[in-house]
Image (cartoon, rainbow, N blue to C red):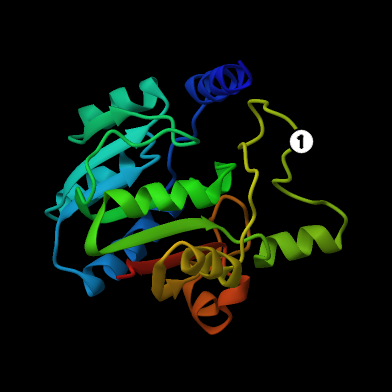
Amino acid sequence: MADDVKDQIIEDFNESRYTAFTFRDLKVFEICREMIEAATERRDMLDVGCGDGTLGEMMIGHGYDVTGADISEPALEIARSRGLKTVRANLEHYELPFEDRSFSVVIGSEIIEHVYDTDRFLRELRRVLKDDGVLLLKTPNVLSFGRRICYLLGRPVFLDTALRPNQPGHIRYFVRSTLEQLLRDNAFDPIASDAGFVNFLQSGAYQSRLLAKLFPSLGGGVIVLSRKAA
């Protein structure tokens, strides 16, 4: 009964609200694509937590065959209109509806921070990933430049306290080292990382790619590309 109640809460929360991607996200998505293409020439891809399919649509435009998985049916409806093959899936504690070794590339953008059991989640992604396949995870950097300034001023940001429409639903927080260790613990070998941009405004209107390269610990995101270990 407890799991049934939890599932309903998760589904209701995600059905009623999901955030459309922004121009800032699109620029980071290009970084993600370049990282993947540097690691593999394969083009069969699973977009876990695909949302409205913005990322998947971009990847399709670069020759990828993209399947999107998400819990939100309204989001999946938009993703289908953008050319993604879609499946509705609860990523918290259910298996994905795919055979073992189904995809060469798996990408999860802004999803692992919403997952309670991250070990189970990564084991499931590993299961559906082909041998020598690559996994790219993107998540907010809890120690980004903007957050450090806010914390210094006594104004914490994105520290969720309830399942409400004005809160994104984050329950896990990462920096690069903690995400890489979590991946290693689940039989992935990190091979590349990036920090995206240092953002001076939450909207991304003012940002610096150069500063993120020079001081990646200040970047707005943690992007880690890993390979499925033997």
Q: Residue furthest bottom?
A: 214
Q: Nearer the viewer, residue 35 or 190?
A: 190
User: Quadrant location of residue 190?
Assistant: bottom left
Q: Would you say 161 lies left or right of 129 here? A: right
The secondary structure type at the circle numbered 1 is loop
At a point 39% along the width and 76% down the height, the residue shown is 192
How many discs appear? 1
Quadrant (top left/top right/bottom left/bottom right) for the C terminus = bottom left
Please report the residue visible at 11 percent of the width from the left and 54 percent of the height from the top. Answer: 63
> Could you tell me which residue is drawn at 24 percent across and 73 percent down?
39
Work out whether 123 lies above or below 171.
Answer: below
In the rendered structure, the answer to whether residue 133 lies left or right of residue 41 reads right
Q: Return the residue at label 1.
A: 161
Which quadrant of the structure image shows residue 3? top right
Image coords of residue 13 (percent x, y): 56, 23
- 12 over 175 or under it: above or below: above
